[in-house]
Image (cartoon, helix red, strand yellow):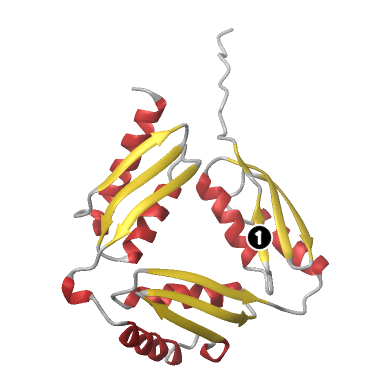
Amino acid sequence: MSTDESLQFTVQQALRWEPQMHDVQLGVTAHQGIITLTGILPNYFLKVEAERIVKNIDGVRAIVEKIAVVFPQDQTLSDEKLAVSILRLYQSSFTIPDERIRFKVENGWVTLEGTLHWNYQKKAAEAALSSIKGIRGISNLLHTQSDYENELLQESIVKALHHSAVLSDAVIAVTLDHRKVTLTGSVNNLYEKDEAERLAWNAPGIASVSNEIEIRPFVKVFSDERE
């Protein structure tokens, strides 16, 4: 079995193993570490879940996603009803500062805009929408802003990466310029690369993260003690 065939089989098995993906039929192809996913899913958040599963697999360097979202007839909502549901959801949340968020709904696609203090609030605003049926996709254009100095932010990001058990074998450098983070270095897989970016985003007020980390799988070399 070739490397591409082996990786394709591994991805297919990983998708089938997840309970929420049992009834899902997705096409999977692999070429030089690039996984292409095709098929139809009944909601946007299964699509996100499929991407998350594939990212966690060793050997995956990139994902090309060609999944369409097609709702069952009873889950189709008008844009007006979606907007009302989103507004009520945000107003009832203790995590999401709804007064700082503006959104629009167009043909089931939700666009979020506004300025927040923390990236976790930005993530929470998107993740909360998983409870609402009828969303076809999300454009999260929320920005973050704070008064922290660059040096303090850079130091906090370096410490977070250093203390991560997931990134124990990683060699990562952090540079910061006007709230814009650049990550360079190398990790073992796509999951570790994404984890480094996630940790960088956890610093307050970060405007962007440029993830230039390379994926170089760690290979153990065993010596023959009999020699």
Q: Quadrant of residue 208?
A: bottom right
Which amino acid lies under the numbered mark 1 shown in the image of this protein? Val
SS for dot 1: strand
Residue 222 drawn at (x, y percent): 56, 21
Q: Is residue 166 visible?
A: no
Which residue in the rendered view is the most extreme toward the front?
107
Residue for badge 1: 209
Q: Quadrant of residue 210?
A: bottom right
At 47% from the left and 35% from the top, the residue drawn is 33
At 42% from the left and 55% from the top, the residue drawn is 52
Q: Is residue 33 visible?
A: yes
At 48% from the left and 82% from the top, the residue drawn is 103
Using the image, determine if residue 9 lies above or below residue 144.
above
Residue 17 drawn at (x, y percent): 27, 49
Residue 132 drawn at (x, y percent): 32, 78
Residue in front for this viewpoint, 207 or 11: 207
Residue in front for this viewpoint, 105 or 188: 105
In the picture, which quadrant includes the C terminus? top right
At 48% from the left and 70% from the top, the residue drawn is 139
In the picture, which quadrant includes the N terminus? top left
Residue 220 drawn at (x, y percent): 56, 28
Using the image, determine if residue 37 lies above or below residue 49.
above
Using the image, determine if residue 88 lies above or below residue 50.
below
